[in-house]
Image (cartoon, helix red, strand yellow):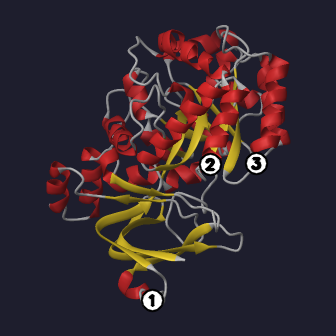
Amino acid sequence: MKAYRAALLYFTGPAQAAYEADGLLVVGPDAQGRQVVQAVGSYQALASRFAEVPTEHLPGRIIAPGFVDMHIHYPQLDVIGSPADGLLPWLENYTFPEESRFSGAAHSAEAAGFFLDELLRNGVTTALAFATSHPESVNALFTEAQNRSLRLMTGKCLMDQNSPEGVRDDTAQSLADTEALIQRWHGVDRLGYAITPRFVPSCSEAQLRGAGELAAKYPDVWIQSHVAENKDEIAWVRRLYPEARSYLSVYEQFGLLRPRAVYAHCIHIDDEDRALMRATGTAAAVSPTSNLFLGSGFFDYEGAERVGFPYGLASDVGGGTSFSPFHTMLAAYYVGREGQTKPGLSLTPQQLWWQHTAGAARALGLEGVVGNLQPGYEADFVVLNPQATPLLARKTALAANLGELLFALIVLGDDRVIERTVISQASGG
């Protein structure tokens, strides 16, 4: 067992943040040998109970839950910051050519290692990630995540039509590869498989049907895809499925809406779609830096809250412009404030932080596992330095309450704030 004395940030309920200015976090093995939170609270209340436990004192630092990224593309590491006229030209000119390189195991392994180290450097300890259509890319990312004891979910992209040579796959082989990868990796250590149809236009009816059959056969795997990101994309889906009520309903038709199903963007949807997400337990991965960068639109937070479906935050690198959760939270604030195309609202700092930690974990079906510092949760956390830059030090010193402190970190913070990222490991690991 080990204890950490520092300021502590954690959640007692949805967007209900607790803060201990002088706190104690105690971690140790559970019955399965996983390093989990054993106790959290004020130092004064817990110190005598854990007096024999070695304690690291971190004055001036804040310990907070590791961040959870609900949607990110590891093969787009080198696509980040590429100029484009919108989603579809960006895919054609940058993304698909880059993803074709991941047919090679060596390139996949190098990129996977760099990608995961960049996540950790930014304080992200759990991620749901896209690979490419090549099984080599999936094996590489799982292997590197396993080497780092990370909680990570990924899967082979399914894309058997409307895709260029080099990334387009064969329908039957793609489904056979998906099942083989599920059997090899799902549930191994902290890894999980995600059935990954890229988006409706890239998948034939046979491929979508096969994906739905695999989702029914393996009900505890994840499903990830994209929906209603861009109006040109929506028009394309309408031409492909003229009888479908909406883009989202195409996925429903093939059995791809359920708990642990996560759809990036969900911008151009209506209340009937929102009700369908709520009824099926399907979650939205809100990707604000990507949506602003590609000019796709603005996620409707008021609609999401009013209807009540699960959602959380995502970087969506490489359409997204930063690995940093601080940049993503700030962009989400901008998106919430936008009031010309939808109702505008001000997300509180606690709501923003929740969406990138415990709220994202809940949307992923991992509540009670990651995303919070409560007894029994896996001990993934970050050590934050609120004095990481001169301006941040000046601003955080003026904070009169928790909201002001968190908002200063959101607006002015970046990877320099993350002093350390600690990952839960099995005892002896």
Q: Please, what is the three-letter code of the amino acid marked with disc 1?
A: Ala
Secondary structure of the residue carrying tag 3 is loop
- Residue at point 48% right, 43% down? 117
Circle 2 crowding by C-alpha within 10 Å: few under 14, some 14–19, many from 20? few
Of the residues under marks 3 and 1, which one precedes in the sequence?
1
- The residue beneath circle 1 is 51
Report how far apart the C-alphas of labels 3 and 1 lie in the structure: 41 Å
For the N terminus, the image quarter is: bottom right
Nearest to the observer: residue 334 or residue 325:
325
Secondary structure of the residue carrying tag 1 is loop
Residue 153, quarter of the rendered image: top right
Report how far apart the C-alphas of labels 3 and 2 lie in the structure: 23 Å
Residue 257 x, y percent position in the rendering: 70, 37
Q: Please, what is the three-letter code of the amino acid marked with disc 3?
A: Asp
Circle 1 crowding by C-alpha within 10 Å: few under 14, some 14–19, many from 20? few
Circle 3 crowding by C-alpha within 10 Å: few under 14, some 14–19, many from 20? some
For the C terminus, the image quarter is: bottom right
- Residue at point 82% right, 34% down? 179
Residue 246, visible in the rendered structure: no
Of the residues under marks 1 and 2, which one precedes in the sequence?
1
Report how far apart the C-alphas of labels 1 and 2 lie in the structure: 33 Å
- The residue beneath circle 2 is 147
Secondary structure of the residue carrying tag 2 is helix
Residue 327 x, y percent position in the rendering: 34, 40
Nearest to the observer: residue 227 or residue 10:
10
